[in-house]
Image: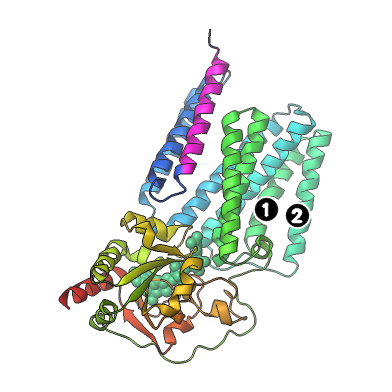
Amino acid sequence: MISMRSVIEASYFIAAILFIFGLKRMSSPVTARGGIVWAGAGMVVATLVSFLHPGMGNYMLMMTAIFIGGVLAWYSGKKVAMTDMPQMIALYNGMGGGAAAAIAAVELFGGEDHGLVFGTLAVLGGMIGAVSFSGSLVAFAKLQGLMKRSFRFPGQQVFNLLLLAATLATAGYIVLAHADVNTIAIFFVLALILGVTMTLPIGGADMPVVISLYNALTGLAVAFEGFVLQNAAMIIAGTVVGAAGSLLTQLMAKAMNRSLANVLFSGFGEESGEASEEVSGSMKPIEAADVAVMMAFANKVLIIPGYGMAVAQAQHKVWELTQLLKSRGVDVKFAIHPVAGRMPGHMNVLLAEAVVPYDIIYDEDEINPEFPTADVALIIGANDVVNPAARNDPASPIYGMPILNADYAKNVIVIKRGQGTGFSGIENALFFLDHTRMLYGDGQAMASELINEVKAL
Ligand code: NAP
């Protein structure tokens, strides 16, 4: 006779395999969509199995919660623009952290003695989950433009450290002294405040790294609570998310040439205090017809897509233009910066959608040596990732971030709508160089014009 326990454990095992398989498929844009479906199926299995647990009690409440969550997620998932994905992820992350903290709260307020090890895990998971919850909500508010500026005051780091120490001390007291409900409530309030005060001073440009960090922390919190509940799916999913989130955090910090400590404590993306170098010269416009001639008779064209290409949804037209140029014998390659756009891999996802073959898509370190031999660097809606201030202006907030060396190309063409700055809000001297020309207009409209002009040659 197969026991219910075995059915539950076997289902969790299947769910875990689906998570890991899904994650593996997400590592390439070709298979990523399928990966999401696999992992989603794993989630459905894990959710359904929770109904089988003995003593689950109120099924109506569970179904209502699943219905409300499902509808909200379905609606927001359908509606969100690709470019708003980071804040969406921040919000979902926050929910994960909040859920882990809620489990910890149920366990701690329940008053049951979990012993030293499981008690510690419950409290730590609760603390990390609560910090991720409130921190992610602040990150969401910043990226959504609901909170415009970073909030800093003198001695903020010392304040945060003291708050951290107080939260940890309360956690220790709860584990060792079986504290009353008031102390437990104070503990959660302290952790929630810590999440807010930790995130408030961090500049907008660092938000992606912070969101990824909270993602990793949420995974950790879920895994800890999984141990407390003896729930295999939570332990495995939490560990996988924690590991993947940590790797992503590291990769993103590296892409910006920053350490994690620097991201968390330095207020990057804020005014640096020192004056940045003045940008001199003027932006020189050019017509699509002239750009078409320049590219059609070039030997090598390097295309740099950025956030503006995503906004304009120009990827299909850009690929059409690429094919036209290639048919004329031009060597065309795509140069992808790791933080171009608004989320990790954003450009790769868009280019995959337009079925651009991978062998002409290059990472920053692969393609940078090729700029000096390129006749044209065609920048479509990118700004910060080609800003030479990152290389040569120590006072610039993006100083030190590796960039694509578009300015080393023989000619630089920039497609953008006007004088708009990039995500970091700073001026870009590249647009004022003697060998740079501005093709003003929407990314997709300009790509279409270029296609027509090249065809007409
Ligand atoms: P960017 O610096 O944000 O610049 C985008 C440029 O596109 C703007 O200057 C804008 O100028 C132009 N643009 C906007 N809409 C357009 C349209 N419809 N057609 C043509 N151009 C348009 O972009 P980026 O170079 O890709 O750099 C990404 C930035 O986002 C970095 O600072 C990065 O740190 C940050 N970030 C990255 C991630 C990530 O994980 N990848 C996440 C969040 C933030 P106009 O207004 O003049 O058109």
> Do we see residue 58 in this rendering?
no
Residue 15 falls within the magenta-colored stretch: yes
- Tell me what residue is drawn at x 33 percent, y 71 percent: 331
Q: Position of residue 226 (x, y in %)?
A: 63, 33
- Asked if residue 99 is positioned above or below residue 296 in the image, the reply reads above
The quadrant where residue 177 appears: top right
Identity, as a three-letter code, of the amino acid under mark 1: Ile
Q: Is residue 358 left or right of residue 51?
A: left
Please report the residue visible at 51 percent of the width from the left and 79 percent of the height from the top. 388
Give the side of residue 65 with respect to residue 214, left or right: left
- SS assignment at label 1: helix
Residue 126: x %, y % from top left: 67, 41
Which image quarter has ligand 1? bottom left
Most common secondary structure along the magenta stretch: helix
Mark 2 beta carbon near ligand 1 (under 8 Å): no
Q: Which residue is mark 2?
A: 163
- The quadrant where residue 347 appears: bottom left
Tell me whether the residue at label 1 lies in contact with that at label 2, contact meaning CB atoms closer than 8 angstroms. Answer: yes
Q: Is residue 313 left or right of residue 170?
A: left
Q: CA distance from mark 1 to mark 2?
A: 8 Å
Are there few (<14), some (14-19), or many (20+) residues within 10 Å of tag 1? some
Q: Where are the magenta residues, as a range?
A: 3-24
Coordinates of residue 119 in the picture (x, y in percent): 75, 33
Q: Which residue is mark 1?
A: 193
